[in-house]
Image: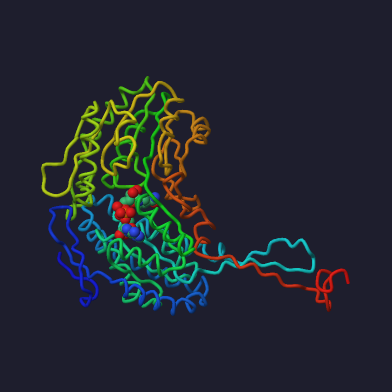
Amino acid sequence: MTTTIGSEATASHLDVRSPIDGSTVATVAATTPTEVVDIAARLRDAQPEWHAIGPRGRAEWVRKWRDWIADNTERLVAMIQQETGKAYGDAISEPGYSLLVASYWIDHAEQLLADEHPESTIPTQRLIVEHAPYPLVGVISPWNWPLTMPMLDIPAALMAGSAVLSKPSELTPLTWNEVVRAWREEIGAPDVLACVNGGGNIGVAVVDTVDMIQFTGSVRTGRLVAARAGERLIPCGLELGGKDPMVVLADADVERAANAAVWGACVNGGQGCSAIERVYVEGPIYDRFVELVTEKTRALRLGTDIDTPFTADVGSMSSEAQLRIVEDHVEQAVAAGARVLTGGKRADAAGWYYEPTVLVDVDHSMAVMRDETFGPVVPIMKVADVDEAMRLANDSDFGLCGSIWTGDRERGIALGRQLEVGALCVNDACVTNFQLALPSGGWKSSGVGARFGGAEGIRKYTRARATLSTLAEPATEPHWYPFGG
Ligand code: NAD
């Protein structure tokens, strides 16, 4: 597949490389900063009418778009696999999840954005809180879920009445460009959604042009975005990295916990912000847990099953740079005394594949237990007791998600209250994001603000306007001039 997207008039192009074999699969025209300003102006022109048609009018367009995604699922999945190298089982979840999110906001936006009437402390005054959209919202996304990441934010922003200027990762722009093209060209929706292409300089241009920025990506870039937003005094939402701990207590169902550890660490090739990145297991079940995890990890099928769905479990790393980070973390750990029970190296095949890996004898001096690995690696540490497990789980700059595994669910929930994370699963992992009534946001360096969570998830794209109207209108008021008169 070799395609060209975008205006040929732009000077430079992005080469999209296949993680499967390193070849160039497409060339995308890069947007210039001047074009970003022009596109933003166009979106701003169209936004007032978009706001004026109200939540029901907007829902009609978002519904048509959602249905187009549903009708084009298999084509989009193939595109996702081409640009990310992920397994079909991971890729197919992207349109599925996107439909879930779009449907949630189609169904809930009107109610969540309705005017509120707080109780007035003065009987003759009537109060209204209105949720008025930021005219132009910017959404900047990473490469690990090229469709899901923008879809987690954009349906809510559109339903709020904002226009949206989006920028996918320069590494994986194809699927998102196609879905934005469909908004205008396939369903004929209003000109309130655009996609610009490029690297960090275009991300900066987006931040410099919009009224609110929703960013998903690394902590390093998140800080830059927050600083820039601060200079402009615009609000930002940041969904950043994670180093999610899994705490397995002695009374846990070992088989279920082992299955979850393997899936939670290797899903999407381990390239998920809420993937399990480190595991702490109490002594009595440690050996059995390690044995099961090793056996199940060894059985995983590595590959990108584009033409043969469900014949691979774990796809490739989406970039060569990411592959090197994973290699580096494992090599450093081994040099410091860790043992590889399976995997531990890049695959012999062409492309950017890393063998699913189990590491033991790890500790917190190692990058694999401290920094985001973002690869199919399960580092497991034996702990003396629950206190040690909780202390180690909290010994991190990150605080995105975590999980606790125990036969006593109530104890798990109670222990979870000590875990410094924005999202917690008890006897499950990585699934809070599928419950859209829950907020999804990181603590500590993992983020600022949250996606979803009912009202909070959509009102962040709006400003509250407080309106007071008076029911009684005497000629003057006791607090007006003359004072004391
Ligand atoms: P990244 O920070 O390198 O890039 C993210 C996006 O920011 C890209 O589109 C990039 O072009 C753009 N960008 C780069 N410099 C910029 C700047 N100065 N100003 C504005 N935009 C700029 O991240 P990545 O490597 O693409 O993605 C991986 C990271 O994303 C991981 O840390 C992962 O944990 C995180 N992530 C978080 C979540 C979440 O919901 N918390 C979800 C997925 C991924």
| Residue 19 x %, y % | 18, 53
Front one among 144 and 306: 144
Q: Residue at x 42, y 44 (%)?
A: 400
Q: Is residue 406 found left or right of 314 in the rendered image?
A: right
Q: Quadrant of the N terminus?
A: bottom left
Front one among 206 and 304: 206
| Residue 433 x %, y % | 42, 49
Q: Quadrant of the C terminus?
A: bottom right
Q: Is residue 469 found left or right of 236 in the rendered image?
A: right
Does residue 328 appear anywhere in the picture?
yes
In the rendered view, tell whether residue 218 sits above or below residue 389: below
Quarter of the rendered structure image containing ligand 1: bottom left
In the rendered view, tell whether residue 132 sits above or below residue 97: below
**In which quadrant of the rendered view does residue 179 lie?**
bottom left
Q: Is residue 399 found left or right of 351 in the rendered image?
A: right
Task: Residue lying at the far front in this picture: please name it.
Answer: 483
